[in-house]
Image (cartoon, rainbow, N blue to C red):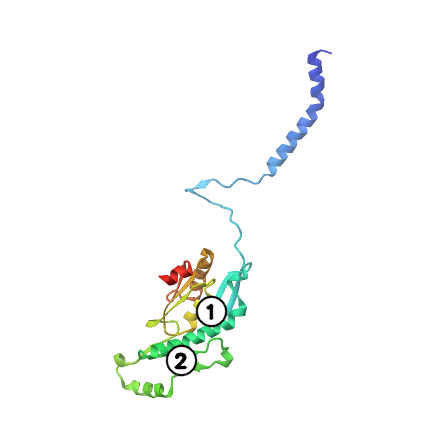
Amino acid sequence: MSLARTILWLSRPLRPAHSLCRAQFMERKAQKPPSPPAMENGTRSWEERPPADPVATVTEGAAKIVFPSANEVFYNPVQEFNRDLTCAVITEFARIHLGAKGIQMTAVKVPGEKDSEKIAVDLSDQEEETAGKNENLAPGDWPRTAAVGEICEEGLRVLEGLAASGLRSIRFALEVPGLQSVVANDASARAVELMHRNVELNGVAHLVQPNQADARMLMYQ
């Protein structure tokens, strides 16, 4: 058999296989997802983004916060009583601290108490008597007061070194009167981003300042 006939004889069985491979290649190419649209004005008109993380919403005290539902480190429900107690202790400390400066605290709700069992911290008998006499004073002579949610220039400055979602600091701003400022600090960038979101959600940006730093270095400063 000549060389030409040998090559022709060998190529015959390969032709169907070659055609089959080519057909499969064209089929896969047709099923390939389309490429992203062309650039328009320097930006793509469509961009694939990962789905947003699901979030959980928690209401505690006067605060409402959101945090990633897949990461429970941002909220510990067992510590709710601890946070209630912290708000109550700081409220009493603020009353004593501001009282020495002649600043009276308005009636406040006891932290952690339900609306159905609302109890207010009222002025003492002596303060009530003084308040009655103040009705005849000029507005400039009225005693200074401190209210929840308002900045008190001579009030307390609070630092929460490990704030996570910022829940405790936000509760301070919404439940404790007589505050000058609250710094909610955490070393985690993700935690600080979450704090910014929760601060805006509760409308306390004028009192609570999220901060990212090592708590030890921040306290040294």
Residue 86, position as x, y percentages in the image: 45, 73
**Residue at 42%, 70% in the rendered image:** 172
Quadrant in the picture for residue 205: bottom left
State the residue in front, 114 or 126: 126
Q: Amino acid at mark 2?
A: Ala
- Residue 63's disc number: 1
Q: Is residue 58 left or right of residue 91?
A: right
- The C terminus lies in quadrant: bottom left
Mark 2 lies on residue: 107
**Residue at 26%, 81% in the rendered image:** 141
Residue 165, position as x, y percentages in the image: 47, 63
**Residue at 66%, 26% in the rendered image:** 18
Give the answer, above or below, for where 165 lies relative to 22. below
SS for tag 2? loop
What residue occupies the far top of the structure in this picture? 2
SS for tag 1? strand
Residue 62, position as x, y percentages in the image: 46, 72
Quadrant in the picture for residue 212: bottom left
Give the answer, above or below, for where 217 lies relative to 142. above
Q: Earlier in the sequence, mark 2 or mark 1?
A: 1
